[in-house]
Image (cartoon, rainbow, N blue to C red):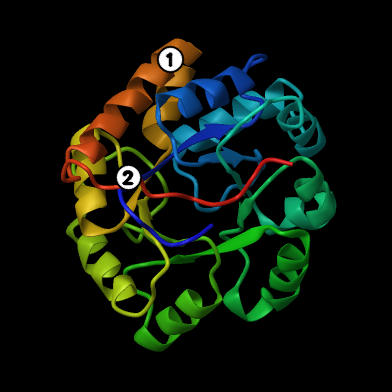
Amino acid sequence: MKGLAGRPLLVPYVTGGITPDWTDYLLAYQEAGADAIEVGLPFSDPMLDGATIQQASDRALARGATPDSILDDLGTVSLRVPIVVMTYANLVLRAGIGRLAAAGVSGLIVPDLPLEESAGLEAASAAAGIDLVLLAAPATPDDRLREICARSRGFVYAISVMDTTGERDSLAGSAATLAARIKAITDLPVLIGFGVSSPAQAAEAGRAGDGAVVASALMRRVLDGATAHDLGRAVADLRAALDLEVPPGTPHAEVSGHRG
């Protein structure tokens, strides 16, 4: 993944295995204008996930979804955009970086892996051609933020609030402050997540940073019965709101990474 050259980036999320036809959501996201897609590997103890993502994970696990079955499904889908897997350290250690790479995964987010213990996974990910994306929070001290920005690959994930994931009525003011701190010390794209719930909030994230990750708002729709077509329309609305922030003629931004 590489730096921005134009429009704000949009990274919608789906919990792997949440429905029998869950890969249809990936295709709908791609056609609706996603720049990359975040796929969650469901975990029984998701420490950073709020109620909606926990419910989505529970549904996927109840269906019998496993890291292997989800990665197998990914290998059957023809996508043009990068896949970024979000999961927890225990599952990464069990599945192995090689297994992720074989499924065509381009990026990896492991929110419960301490920075002090991430060197081994950083090296293994780099060797496999997978970007290990690091997270920064509003309370992250300046010295630690500099280290996160220096070691993150692909983009820096800016957590908008000191809380779990979940839908919110407005984008927290701390999101813009954090994004400005990050952008002052790195050329990597800064994507804002945790609470981006509407097109207006996505546009605000695009102004404050370099784009948005949208998860709980989309998974709530799936839990309520939304089809892939429905979610494609929702992502298209997010894309349109982000694109309104870009002057005409501006070249598109790009998230590098290719499907295997």
Task: Say whether residue 73 is left or right of residue 210.
Answer: right
In the depicted structure, whether residue 74 falls above or below residue 249: above
Residue at screen point 61% across, 53% down: 107
Task: Write down the residue under mark 2.
Answer: 195
Q: Give the percent coordinates (x, y) of residue 46.
A: 58, 47
Amino acid type, label 1: Asp
Judged from this view, the residue extending furthest toward the bottom is 143
Residue at screen point 25% across, 30% down: 240
Q: Give the percent coordinates (x, y) of residue 192.
A: 34, 54
Report the disc number at residue 224.
Answer: 1
**Mark 2 Cα within 10 Å, few/some/many (few <14, many 20+)?**
many
Which of disc 1 and disc 2 is earlier in sequence?
A: 2
Residue at screen point 46% across, 75% down: 149
Place residue 218 in its image quadrant.
top left
Place residue 231 in its image quadrant.
top left
Residue 71 visible here: yes
Judged from this view, the residue extending furthest toward the front is 249
Amino acid type, label 2: Gly
Which residue is at the front of the view, 182 or 18?
182
Residue at screen point 41% across, 79% down: 145
Place residue 77 in its image quadrant.
top right
Q: Give the percent coordinates (x, y) of residue 135.
A: 47, 64
In the depicted structure, whether residue 117 falls above or below residue 102: below
Q: Give the percent coordinates (x, y) of residue 41.
A: 66, 40
**Mark 1 Cα within 10 Å, few/some/many (few <14, many 20+)?**
few
Distance from the alpha carbon under mark 2 to that under mark 1: 19 Å
In the depicted structure, whether residue 244 falls above or below residue 144: above
Task: Say whether residue 251 is left or right of residue 208.
Answer: right
